[in-house]
Image: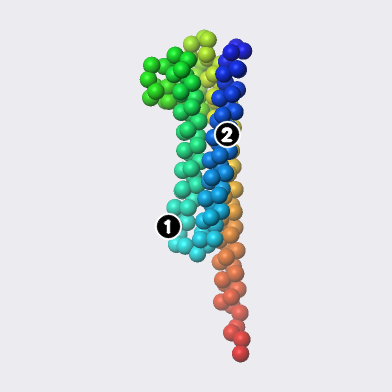
Amino acid sequence: MLINLLIGVPVMALCLVFQVRLLVYALQYYGRQRQAFCTVRRSSRLLIISSVMLILVFGNLLQAALWALVFMLLGEFSSFSEAFYHSLVNFATLGYGDFVMSDTWKLLGPLEALNGILMVGVSTSALMWILQNAFTALAEHQAANQQTVKQPAEK
């Protein structure tokens, strides 16, 4: 059990580093696009939000790939695709990690699930913050434009 923790906890820490890096990148990307968000067409707004979401999803897939690599190095799977599938199932907390893994390494399944639920939660909260921020900015922009239209022209 201790060996599982000695392997799993550093992998979780490395996943956290990946998550933070991509989260910062996603927030910086959104920050660069925020001004344009209010003035571009609806389809362009969708592209901005979708890009942020893809960056965050990529981070989660990268973390699952890291876990799959660990499983391969431990000899639990013979192919990366099999290890990656198993890893995604664990990362998404669907389960059965303890049934597929050998007794020696089966604690890594729940550790990855714990890692996954935390990292997917971070991605979800970041995306929700960006959505709230973007649509608040859009509403404020539209309200300001309506105020400008309502004011009579000065003589």
Q: CA distance from mark 2 to mark 1?
A: 32 Å
Identified at 59% across, 67% down, the residue is 143
- Residue 7 visible (yes or no): yes
Q: Nearer the viewer, residue 33 or 155?
A: 33
Q: Is 30 left, or right, of 86 in this rendering?
A: right
On the image, the x and y values in percent for residue 97 come to 50, 19
Circles 2 and 1 in contact, beta carbons < 8 Å = no
Q: Which residue is painted at 44% across and 57% down in the image?
A: 44
Question: Foreground residue, 142 or 35?
Answer: 35
Residue 60 place in picture, x, y as percent: 50, 34
Residue at 49 percent across and 24 percent down: it is 67
Q: Name which residue type carries label 2.
A: Val
Q: Position of residue 24 (x, y in %)?
A: 57, 44
Identify the image's colour scheme: rainbow, by chain, secondary structure or one colour. rainbow
**How many C-alpha atoms fall within 10 Å of the one at disc 2: few (<14), some, or many (≥20)?**
few
Label 1 crowd (10 A; few <14 / some 14-19 / many >=20): few
Position of 89 relative to 150 (above/below): above
Helix, strand or loop at label 2? It is helix
Instruction: State the count of labels.
Output: 2
Q: Quadrant of residue 25?
A: top right
Q: Quadrant of the N terminus?
A: top right
Name the residue beneath numbered marker 1: 43
Q: Identify the residue at horizontal 54%, vertical 18% (top origin).
A: 108
Mark 2 vs 1, N-terminal side: 2
- On the image, numbered disc 2 is attached to which residue? 17
Image quadrant in which you'd find residue 76: top left
Quadrant of image for the C terminus: bottom right
